Image: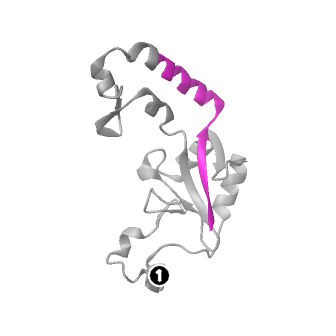
Amino acid sequence: MGTNYYRVPKASEMTKREQKLHERLRYDMNLYDPSQAYQEFRIIEDPNDTWSNMNPWEEFIQGVNVHLGKRSGGWKFVWNFHNNKYYSNKEELLSFIRSGKIVNEYAEVIDQEEFIEMALSWGQPDGLVADKEYFDNAPHHSWMSNPEEYYDREIDGLRVSSSTEFS
């Protein structure tokens, strides 16, 4: 069993998001326009998805709860880089962490510096890593035809999951 950690916005960021939501509702949405209603008020282009738009609420909550990673007994801490959506290296990751609040999956708030220290030291120096050696020695993974796609990556000395969906 492990514990997942998330970055959530500070109050000042939430205030800015709230103001933008109110502006969208007041100036961009027309509750009486049948075409907007038909589109579920998806009036905002999502820069990460050229095929779909968001409604004001989806824009408001996008990125409010960003999974940072997970610690598990016997393993090195594993980071979630979200395909570089919020950060792409250790320096950007640490800046992102410090720009918000850190909570675990039990909604407990953790000091950013304490979280960073814990995550960087968890499972060091000899915790498990999902790499070639691990998969070669794990018989329960023998069914996998291409285990390489599940190997952890290393970015700036951090263990980074190959998946963005894990818990």
- Apparent side of residue 89 relative to residue 112 in the rendered image (left or right): left
State yes or no: residue 145 in magenta: no
Residue 26, given in percent of the width and then of the height, sits at 45, 14
Which image quarter: residue 122? bottom right
Which image quarter: residue 148? bottom left
What residue do we see at 69% from left, 57% from top? 117
State yes or no: residue 5 in magenta: yes
- Apparent side of residue 113 relative to residue 93 in the rendered image (left or right): right
* Three-letter amino acid code of the residue under disc 1: Glu
The N terminus: image quadrant: bottom right
Q: Nearer the viewer, residue 138 or 78?
A: 138
| Label 1 CA crowd tier, 10 Å (few <14, some 14–19, many 20+) | few
Secondary element type, mark 1: helix
What residue do we see at 36% from left, 68% from top? 149
Residue 69, given in percent of the width and then of the height, sits at 56, 57
Residue 22, given in percent of the width and then of the height, sits at 50, 18
Colour setting: one colour
- The total of numbered circles placed on residues is 1
Q: Is residue 46 above or below residue 115?
A: above
Residue 60, given in percent of the width and then of the height, sits at 49, 31
What residue do we see at 54% from left, 51% from top? 67
Q: Which residue is mark 1?
A: 133
Which image quarter: residue 29? top left
> Magenta span covers which residues?
1-23
Q: Nearer the viewer, residue 96 or 23?
A: 23
Q: Is residue 34 above or below residue 89?
A: above
What residue do we see at 47% from left, 37% from top? 62
